[in-house]
Image (spheres, helix red, strand yellow):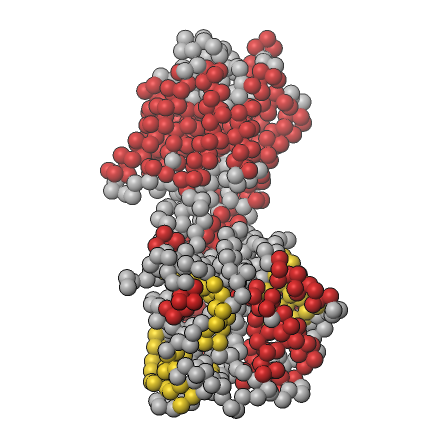
Amino acid sequence: MSKLISSVSPHFYGKRTTQTIMLDVIIALLPAAVASVIIFGLRSLLVIAVCIGTCVLSEFLFQKLCKREVTAMDLSAVVTGMLLAFNLPVSIPIWQAVLGSVTAIIVVKQLFGGIGQNFANPAITARIIMMTAFSGSMTTWTMPGNGADAVSSPTPLAAAAKGLKDAMPSYQTLFLGNHGGCLGETCALAIILGGIYLVIRGVITWHTPVVYVATVALMSFICGKDVLYQVLSGGLLLGAVFMATDYATTPNTKWGKVVFGVGCGLITILIRFWGNLPEGVSFSILIMNILTPYISKLTRSKPLVGGAKK
Amino acid sequence: MKLHGIKVPHKKNTAGCKPVRIPVPERVVIPMSMHIGKLAKVTVKKGDELKVGQLIGEADGFVSSNIHASVSGVVEKVDEMVASNGSKVPCVIIKSDGKQEMYEGLKAPDVKDFQSFVQAVKESGVVGLGGAGFPSFVKLGVKDLSKVEAVIINAAECEPYITSDTRTMIDKSDFVFKGIDAVRKFMGVKRFIIGVENNKREAIEVMQKSAEKTDDVEVHVMPSIYPQGGEKVLVYNTVKRIIPKGGLPLDVGVIVTNVTTLAFIAEYLETGVPLVEKCLTVDGSAVKEPKNVIAPIGTPIKDLIEGAGGFKSEPAKVLYGGPMMGIAVPSMDEPVLKNTNAVIFMDEKEATPPKTTPCISCGACVSHCPFRLDPREISRAYKLKDAEALEALCVDLCMECGCCSYICPANRPLVQTNKLGKVMLREYLNEKKARQEKENKEKEKKEAKK
């Protein structure tokens, strides 16, 4: 008789793995990907593919070079690639997309210890770096239907900030996404669908997205702005559903998530209404990422110790 | 407030299987430690002729238990064996004569009051049959009976596969209620709660029918969320009280006893036959015909498989108890113990743990822990050998239910680090105590000199 396996309990294992979670996120991102191809044409598919490919490849090569365990196949790099692509304009030069992806994976993720260890969201941080480095191409917004022939047009938020009434799309256009902006952020419908899928699958909880969006809505109302316009435009929904819910860089507790959402909402409003930039979602999430360890510490769940021993 | 838990596959394949008695094994190996507490003292020697129910190990000390011969035959050897926790314990090996003659000295105990009731429970050799193995006479022998507001009968049976308690409720429901009668009569308890998970419909019906005839027994049906049968979880979900850290159910005015333990006590009061056999579930992916079997205590677990149609495939892992908290045994020669309520034979596919990957900080271990511990932080503190952090994280509260490891998408061995963390904390606290005592003594000496 062969030797029996001896291991510590439990001897049953749940079916969910890192890979299945990442697969769920990819599935949730697919509607937005499809929408981006419909809205901006086939070049958006190219940008998404380049970002995914570069992310996976740079993770693989970095881990090989550093003689670390290769986890490039756990699909997390695919998620980062998709999210980064969703944060870029369709006309972005391919080499810039490649550089952005490498930055996201190697600088933001791997140098801090890889999956689960990075303190900032790779896609968001890479986007911010790219916005600083390539401010021209990162703010050239193509009107839908024009393909790669970049015809610059203001995003809905820029239009609103400058008071260009004619350039402000209708609610319906905002909801369906047929306007200028980043690849994956324009179609609110697709993002909401993805978000609902993630909540149903138990990958994320509703707290962060709902609190984040609600804070933005409330503050817009208080500031006398068009509430629905503020909620539907810019990267708010994409950020709230997919980036502010990243496991490693946001709090895990219920109240931590609420605090995180409120913080993101307030910073977004500050930047949108009083800042120099038309959009503040990326910065708000990055700033809250930095505060996450403190929020986690303050909202840590208390063990059930019960009353005093009699 | 709701306690967290997880949904595990039930796999109660054997819920409908009435227990069958297995053929008398050729020999039994009975260790002197089948309970929490001090070892029993061997009272027989090589060559002694024994009958079923004869005392072979005597309770030695306060938390200990009597042990009886489970087969008739001759003592082949008084030996030492390695128990599943790694310690060496004396054991009595009896070669069976196959006759299973009962010991003439067995008679129903004469129980008149609380003292004699506890004495009878002690003599029966019964321990917590749900798995904990805590000597029942210690648990029931409370000093101040007025403290006991209710007795909670643990019939949750939340572990996958196991159905032996379910069978007790169906096949021995009269003994369950006779046990309640005895506790009511001799301990003066006025409230009984039978806590059972809602996946045992037949057993619930039987219990409810009998409970209707009384006015102090309630059947508390709970959702099937593991670990519903954990003592603290059960107490909270039935009477909404939290047992303090390091405390006992009695600290919140209740006693928790397993349903099979209670039924056995009632049976003993009637027949005087001590705990010599166990009804247990034999199941798992390597078993051809999952069954509930009745086996003499000390039966090598390899002899159980005959009763369940043999192996479908070669077992790669064999467990005492269920898959969530069970212990993987080193070999199939290990005996059936008093607190063994199941033996699970797993094939290679079921037994092989998935690969451990890096922690993704998802927080699922925290949000599924019934006691709201943070296994991720605990494992970090353990790796840093930070005992003070372990104390602050309340690692000693962990009951090792396995929810964290089960739910972890990275399959990290969180129960293992919790266990190691508990040991590290205990050693640290012991050292601290010793150091303090030493300091105090030196202080006293100095003061005495002055």
Relative placement, left or right, of A38 versus B209 is left
Residue at figure coordinates x 34%, y 37% from the top left: A73
Which of the two residues, B419 or A309, is positioned nearer the viewer here? Answer: B419
Which of the two residues, A266 or B370, is positioned nearer the viewer here? Answer: B370
Residue at figure coordinates x 32%, y 20% from the top left: A95
Residue A69 visible in the snapshot: yes
Q: Position of residue A289 (x, y in %)?
A: 47, 37
Which of the two residues, B394 or B289, is positioned nearer the viewer here? Answer: B289
Residue at figure coordinates x 51%, y 79% from the top left: B275
Q: Position of residue B352 (x, y in %)?
A: 35, 53
Relative placement, left or right, of A88 versus B106 is left
Q: Position of residue A119 (x, y in %)?
A: 42, 39
Q: Position of residue A36 (x, y in %)?
A: 47, 19
- Find residue B180 and report its image quarter: bottom right
Q: Is residue B176 above or below residue B16?
A: below
Q: Is residue A285 above or below residue B377?
A: above
Which of the two residues, A49 or A159, is positioned nearer the viewer here? Answer: A49
Residue A234 visible in the snapshot: no
Residue at figure coordinates x 67%, y 27% from the top left: A222
- Find residue B156 and report its image quarter: bottom right
Q: Is residue B200 above or below residue A289?
A: below
Relative placement, left or right, of A35 versus B332 is right
